[in-house]
Image: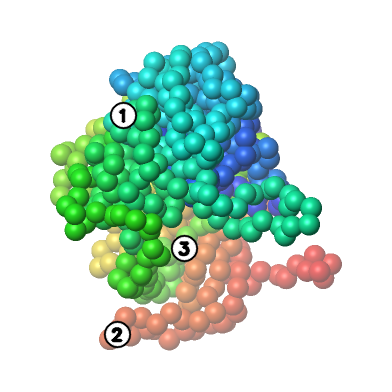
Amino acid sequence: MPPAPWIEPPLDEHERARAEQNLFSDHREVALGARVAVFAAPGDGGGAVGGAAGGAAPGAAAAGAAGAAGAAGAAGAPAVGPFAVHADLGVLGPLKLPAGFTWVGIAGERDDALYVATPEGALHRAADVRAALRPDGFEQRGSVPGATVWDASGGRIAAAVGERVSVSADEGRTFTSAVVAPGKVVRAVFVRPDGALVARVSAAGAPSRGRPAPAGRAAPPTGPVVADTFVSSDRGRTWSRSTFQPRTVERAGSWIWNGDPVCPAVLSRDGRTWTRAASVDLLHDRPTFGAALHLSTAIRARELGVLRSALVPQAPVPPPSSAAAVGREPPCKDDGKAGGIAGGLRGMFRAACEGALCLLTDVPPWPSPTRTWIAAFGDGLCDPARVPPGGACAAHLVRPPTFAVVDQRSGAVTPVAAPEGCAQPVALRNAAGVGVLVCRAAGGAAALFVRGAEGPWRAEGSHAFPADAIERIVAAPDGTLLLRAETPSPSAPKRAPLQALVRSPLPLGAPQAWRRLVVPDGVAALPAPGGAALLASSPAASAGALLDVSLDRPEQPLLALARGIEVSHDLSEIDLQDGRVRLFVRPELVLGLPGQRRRPPTGPQDEGWHVLTHGGELVPEAPPPADERR
């Protein structure tokens, strides 16, 4: 049987260091709406990433906060592009944002429209996140010439130039402006969904950054820019100095606050007073949209309606006078009760075993990474009402996660939907350039779908195999695949049969590509070229002292390679290399459970790899030639 036509060679050593990395590790939330968030990283095509003037944290959904991207990312890091996460649609991207953008925002009374500003102050709008996927999805609206800081939320967009803040209530077509504080430059502006606004302006005598010292004078002081905070409760028409002057300001959804989880101060619903009574748990107990923007082979999901958005949690109610924050904020006194990171060690225990039964504890290595990697985003959804007590959200999906075809050389990420007919994916495995998706079918059977670098998902049948028990995938050099179920415990009084699914190296979507193997007393299974499988079993009555090895080939009788092999030491691995069956002999016996008696070892005690001979004996493998050892 020829090698699989879809097979890909392993990545070289240099490329392997970047395999299966988190391509979104540098992405930050640059815009947040009611049901969608936008994420971008340096190198995504826009202005420099940074925090807002006045102290907004990098990545916060705030005016003047990160423009979406820098001129270049980290050295050697692939440019994935800006992506969005929608509460209902999942992960979408890469977005086609106008070139050279300096800011991205989300606003809308009914729908989350995307807005992008360019360096000259022009504003562009896409009706929704799906429109932003098209090169022609953005249309130009109004402009605020010279604007350097922006924010948007609810039905309003704000921009600042000099001492003025301009506000639009008609989707960016027109703007009205007002002076915040005469003679003071607006460094940041924040818009809440209900229309309340906050501006940060340079305080009198504040140091300026980047300005050379006048001749004969000392250089101006460096360090944080001192700023005053002004508020507007009439949608930007008039401004007044805030009764509370926080050291920093940022916006997290509908919270405009000081960003301090130990000593929080949050602007209340009246748009004027600040409260110390708001619980930070309301903010931090809700996962962000960014939790979905992580690629892995795990099937992950979240409950409906739990995300932090531009509307949830709501701004807190006005405080009683005893809980109001007033005056200039002093440094917070941390009493040490703010919590900490609790860690622990989890012990790892290996089940007691003897002889050939120790092969049940063998964990085959993952297949070598190739250029194509099929992964899943963490954006699946479950309905908590349908999850039984103690059940996992990801096991009861109302919407499967979005998947992705990843080019591990270029870093390109192409989101793809789950295959039709797979409402409940349970496992995703990759080998030799193809992804194998296992879905739970009727009765818990395994419905298999495969996908490579090209083309759609291809269904490859449903099999009477426990879908939820898939443990690992192993590949032969020609593309023969083996999906192994969880192995029975070697110390169990009565071992269940070993089960596996083997795929011949046929084109993707080929009928009858998979076959099921059930091996009574089985202890190991490996794929072999030509769609075959190497099987090892140990008769239950021998307690691991005997080993049988056979070859299972497509549409041919089982071929016994050796029977009744005497095993006097524990075997930890089995391998198939250049047509030879190899087994690894442990150097020492593993202690049994308390009260268990181990039979004394007999025969040679050579540690390391042993080769199975035609006569059914295990002999130490000959060492490689001297030049190969060097």
* Residue 514 visible in this rendered orientation of the protein: no
Q: Closer to the camera, 317 or 497?
A: 317
User: Considering the image in quadrants, where does the N terminus appear?
Assistant: top right
> What residue is rendered at 19% in x and 41% in y?
384
Q: Earlier in the sequence, mark 2 or mark 1?
A: 1
145 left or right of 61 in image: right
Q: Which of 552 and 182 is in front in this view?
A: 182
Query: Residue placed at 53% from the left, 49% from the top?
Result: 204
Residue linked to disc 3? 362
**First along the sequence among labels 1 and 3:** 1
Label ID, residue 490: none
- Amino acid carrying label 2: it is Pro
Q: For residue 594, which numbered disc appears in the image?
A: 2
Is any atom of residue 614 visible in this view?
yes
Please identify, in this view, whether the residue under mark 2 or under mark 1 is nearer the observer: 1
**Residue bearing mark 1:** 234
User: How far from the left and from the top, in percent, is residue 357?
Assistant: 40, 67
When asked about the image quadrant of residue 464, the answer is top left
**589 horizontally vs 477: left or right:** left
Residue 534 is situated, as x and y percent measured from the top left of the image, at: 51, 51
- Nearer the viewer's eye, disc 1 or disc 3? 1
Q: In this view, does 71 lie above or below 16?
A: above
- Tag 2 secondary structure: loop
Residue 83, percent from left and from top:
50, 32
- Given residues 565 and 433, the one toward you in this image is 433
Identified by mark 1, the residue type is Asp
Alpha carbons under labels 1 and 3: distance apart: 68 Å
